[in-house]
Amino acid sequence: MKVVNITFKFADGSPDETHPAVEGESVLDVALNNNIKLQHNCGGVCGCSTCHVYVEAGMDDLPEISDKEEDYIDRAVDPRINSRLGCQCVVQGNEDIVITIPEQDFLGH
């Protein structure tokens, strides 16, 4: 199994974190497995835009964006050309990835 590193940067100013990821894991999976708060209201099935992230490096190591994902990104706060949904960013194991997690609103937390 191929392993790469995902570096998580945080728009709220928290320190960067780098964690290993194996081929087939999503950015959302790696975040949650390492106690990184990343919203995922739909449960990570590409049914919302709450796991919206910015891919700063490693985009070529992720699957091509689908029409469905693109539709949900259009609904996210401050979408950019490098926006993706963490649940759809499945590691292919060839290149390290750098992700920025935008500011998030956790209702009731």
Image (cartoon, rainbow, N blue to C red):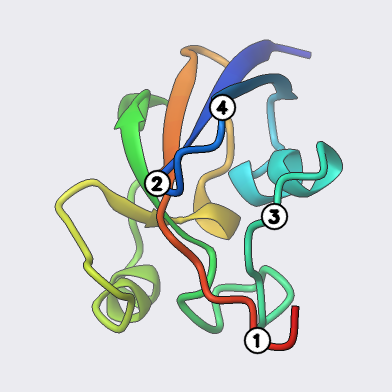
- The CA span between labels 4 and 1 is 23 Å
Give the residue drawn at x 73%, y 38%: 30
Q: Which label's residue is closer to the chain start, 4 or 1?
A: 4
Residue 54 left/right relative to 20: left
Provide residue 11's location: percent of width, then percent of height: 40, 46
Neighbours of disc 4 within 10 Å: few (<14), some (14-19), many (20+):
few
- What residue does disc 4 label? 15
Q: Given this view, does label 1 or label 3 mark the residue nearer the observer?
A: 1
Provide residue 98's location: percent of width, then percent of height: 43, 26
Q: Are marks 1 and 3 in contact (CB under 8 Å)?
A: no
- What residue does disc 3 label? 37
Q: Which label's residue is closer to the chain start, 1 or 3?
A: 3
**Secondary-structure class at tag 2:** loop
Residue 11, label in figure: 2
Q: Which label's residue is closer to the chain start, 3 or 4?
A: 4
Residue 30 left/right relative to 59: right
Q: Amino acid at mark 4?
A: Pro
- The CA span between labels 2 and 3 is 13 Å
